[in-house]
Amino acid sequence: MLEFVKQSKKRKLYCILGILYLLCIIFVANDAWLYSTPIAKLTKVETSVSGEEIGTRGTKEKKYKQNIQGVILNGENKGKTISFTNEYTYTGMMKQPYHRGDKVLLNGTSKRMGSGIRGLKRDTELMILVGFLMFVLITIAGRQGALTIVTVIFNVAVFAIGFWKAGDTSNVLEMCSRLVILFAVITLVGLNGIHKKTWAALFTTLIVLVMIMGIFDVVIHHAEDLDYSTMEYLGSIENPDEIFHAEILISGLGAIMDVAVAIAASLSEIVEKKSEVTFLELFKSGREIGYDIMGTMINVLLFVFGCGLIPMCLIRMNNDVSLITIIKLHIPCELCRFLVESIGIVLAIPISILVTSVMIKVPGMFHRQKKARKVQGEGKC
Amino acid sequence: MLITLGLILLILIMVVGGDRGVVSLIALCGNLLILSLAIWLMASGVPVLLVTVCVGVVISCITLFYQNGRNGKTWSAFLATMITMLLLFFFIYIVVWRSEAGGLNEIQQVGEDVFYYNMNLNISMRNVAVSVILLSTLGAVLDMALTVTTSVYEVKSHKEDMTFKELIHSGMQIGKEVTGTTVNTLLFAYLGESLLLFSYLRMQGYSFELLLNSKIMFENCASMIFGAIACVVVMPVAAVAGGAIFSGLNKHKIQRST
């Protein structure tokens, strides 16, 4: 085993990464001392059926009751046992079962341990997932994978700092438009390096973003107003339209960049291989690439958007609200966002072809003319 | 409003995409219909995981075989997608079970829905959560698988004498190049969606500890991370599947011709 590892540098690196990953998981699994909220580890869980309730569709729903005992892991009450009860139904809509060995956050403070469970401690699972993604990215995708990790970390950091600094949501749109430019620069430069095609992709992305926001605004002005009150989670936010604009701006950004990079990269490769290629030829091959990405990119967004709605639809449809009513009354905002983003993806194709071919070809032509003149001049001599 | 936007999209797809734009539009509508059918089936009490598996297969068939034709490329992409999703299914199920990420999250629990609707659906919300994560990654995985197998096919058709190993290598190369943007696409799609949540939680004065362990955070992160993991894992699987099918195809052809 050791010999096998020592054979190449790559294997050594992977081994070190793997060990680091394990250490991180062990650390996060035992980080209760870092928390100021009291944390308990469940040592005994007894589950019993406590009765039946009437469910939807005329079914009977089983109810369960759990008697739970746990040991406090941190704070002043460390080591004390605590017991609580938990009730849940088969559906598990409001409350979920707990298992032996789970760690839970309690609703008390570090001095008083509290009387009930506030929620599961999910940071270990989160760490396992994040670590696994990083591991897979580095081992399978190599250098590109590492670059991806760096750009994602930068983007998330920018997002978090932007939000934390803004304090309130009063000028969220202004902040997000700045953030979007930063996101685009970080992602494109980080993944492709400083290159002509990077700038082409960046310009395309910004132009398309401005265009879809314009289209959205024009349509909103000329049609009846969008009812923002149907937006999920919208309890007490006072500027829903700004937040909605910001949402469209950010969630479409990734897909638009993807299209722009794909076209810019392949067009610049064509120019590199065949420098005498004409605008028309470039346009044709750009369209060819565009056909292929368009459908799949919209598909990706469709699944992200559609699947998030499943739980909400299930609740409503089981309470005699028809699917058509849901589409009409409950999800117009989500639908609208999806449509605007799809428009962005489609628009990105011709625009990126145009921008890329202009940016790559025009300086090239200039250069060649200069060269030609030079040659002519030498000929005269 | 929605109709106007829909019409704009329709016209743009037809103008920019031409005939193939229309094909992808039909495939898109097909997927949308299948997704609604899936929701309807789940809502009427058919086992959630069974519906998920069937719908996953049907959607893959529509996206690959209808949109891109029946050939070695799409068959190997189909195979790779199925293998990856099967592997991922167990991983997702274990993680969702460990973190009990089903049901309503903290914000939804205090929403109005709880008062209006009967919440005893007799449908396991844990399975619904698994289904949501699995299906929402499907689009990106199909995209990635097809990209890799297509490039393996292109390389093979240009250079007949490529070996199995070389084919895999070239497939991985293309895959690596698109990984970055695909992962970022997913990241931004979910960041945009959770923008509202962040602003809401900011107002509620959630502490960092509670936010990190909340179900809302977990739901959003899990979907995004699983999507990214699936996209990366499908790459070598698709390269191997494509390499095996195309190098096998070639031998077959040679045998026939001799």
Image (tube, rainbow, N blue to C red):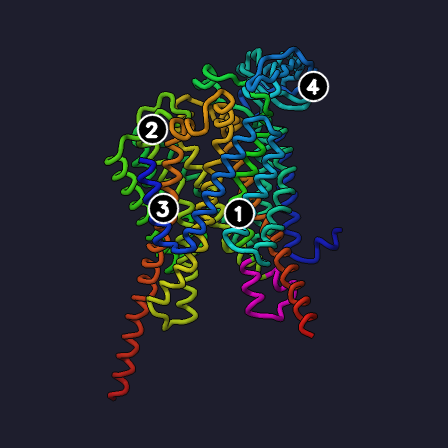
Could you tell me the amino acid type at mark 1? Ile
Are labels 3 and 2 assigned to the same chain?
Answer: no
User: Residue A268's spot in the image, x, y percent?
Assistant: 40, 63
Are labels 2 and 4 assigned to the same chain?
Answer: yes
Q: CA distance from mark 4 to mark 1?
A: 49 Å
| Tag of residue B10 | 3
Residue linked to disc 2: A169
- Residue at point 30% right, 41% down? A213
Check contact, mark 2 vs mark 4: CB within 8 A.
no
Front disc: 4 or 3: 3
Q: Chain of mark 1?
A: B
- Residue at point 24% right, 88% down? A380
The earlier-in-sequence mark between 2 and 4 is 4
| Tag of residue A20 | none
Residue linked to disc 4: A43
Could you tell me the amino acid type at mark 4? Thr
Front disc: 3 or 2: 3
User: Residue B128's spot in the image, x, y percent?
Assistant: 57, 30
Residue linked to disc 1: B62
Q: CA distance from mark 1 to mark 2?
A: 42 Å
Segment colored magenta:
B150-169
Q: Chain of mark 2?
A: A
